[in-house]
Amino acid sequence: MHELSIVSSIVDSVTQTLEAYPGARVKEVRLRIGALASVVEDSLQFCYGIATDGTPLEGSKLVVKILPVTMHCDSCASDVEIASLQSFRCPRCDAPVSDLRQGRELEIESIEIDEVEEKV
Amino acid sequence: MTTRIVELRQGILKKNDELARGLRGRFQSAGVLVLNLVSSPGTGKTAFLERTLRELRAGGARAAALVGDLETDNDARRLAASGAPVRQINTHGICHLEAEMIGKHLEGWDLADLDYLFIENVGNLVCPSSYDLGEKIRVALLSVTEGEDKPLKYPTLFNSADAAILTKIDIAEPCGFDRTTALKNINEIRPGIRIFETSAKTGAGMSDWLAYLADEKSRKS
């Protein structure tokens, strides 16, 4: 259960980004998480509420996009999506696949903020 | 008030990844082969590592270890009996090792004096898989007492491993261990992975493992 450390890293990164937008309020934080990243969305959401308390991220929404696992199949010479994490085989030709192309991402994609209008 | 989307496209564990990259560079230029050992608590990482350190040293190789646990320095004391330099990392509740802890605990060691550095991670099959420690080889260990389906239950870890070790094979029979199924399951999650069937007690499988280490050590980058 390392979701709390993950969420703390998110808070740090976003807080740092906000330095360029003084006074801005965060509405939404969007993540891209690979299906093989060992992260559970429910516990991320749970920890997010706790870790953002008292920070500029407080009250913001965490949106998690889960990315499927994609492997390269040599026999088919193409990237294929693995439907189940129980078997790393090509869904087309059943060959074992070990060349991972997507699935371990742990990324902040973007944040949505409300900026304060500059006084003229 | 205006709403704005700020694109970040940034790794959440960016700080760890950057530190790990730095460590990997240091390890490479010092010519030390670094392995990260990951398993459940009780698999026998420490016993396996004790035997590995002892045999490597007997063969004239210079090996050291960092060992992670939530509390106690029991494992470091066990491993130090091999004569190898060993340091304990106490994480005080954190369920995995991070690159920063590795960097901190390497202070004062001359990496160029080492052939091998083993990092024994905290016993946990989930969280360590997210944290790069700068290692060249990630080793997943599984004991014959744990059940053949463990690789299927923890695919994220087994899929990220470069080598797999079966431990305690001396008691495989009384445990009713189904070897064929275990090997098949590991291969299903990580096709083509090197698997070593070992016993720290009898020494079974150790010569293959040591040959693999020597081979990886001599391989460039």
Image (cartoon, grey):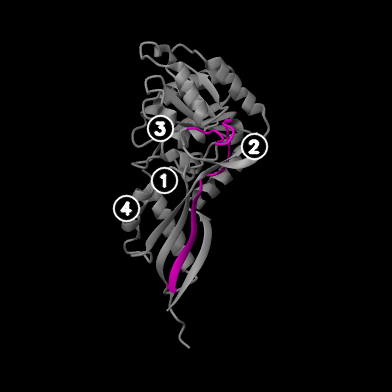
Q: Give the residue number, with chain letter if any, for mark 2.
A: A76
Discs 1/2, front: 2
Are tags 3 and 4 found on a single chain?
no
Q: Residue at x 62, y 27 (%)?
A: B216
Q: Which disc is residue A61 wearing? A: none
Q: Which of the two residues, B168 or B120, is positioned nearer the viewer here? A: B168
Amino acid, disc 4? Phe
Against A23, residue A4 (above or below) is above
Residue A66 percent coordinates (x, y): 46, 50
Q: Give the residue number, with chain letter if any, for mark 4.
A: A46
Q: Give the residue number, with chain letter if any, for mark 3.
A: B153
Residue A79 visible in the shown view: yes
Amino acid, disc 1? Val
Residue B47 percent coordinates (x, y): 42, 21
Q: Quadrant of residue B69?
A: top left
Against A63, residue B63 (above or below) is above
Amino acid, disc 3? Lys
**Regarding mark 1 in the picture, which secondary structure is present there?**
loop
In magenta segment, residue B137:
no
Q: Which residues are magenta?
A: A87-114
Q: Chain of mark 3?
A: B
Q: Give the residue number, with chain letter if any, for mark 1.
A: A39
Disc 2 crowd rating (10 Å Cα; few below 14, some 14-19, many 20+) is few
Q: Quick one: label 2 or label 4, which is nearer the N terminus?
A: 4
Disc 1 crowd rating (10 Å Cα; few below 14, some 14-19, many 20+) is many
Compute the Cα span from label 3 to label 2. 28 Å
Q: Which of the two residues, B24 or B130, is positioned nearer the viewer here? A: B130
Compute the Cα span from label 1 to label 2. 30 Å
The image quadrant where one finds the N terminus of chain B is: bottom left
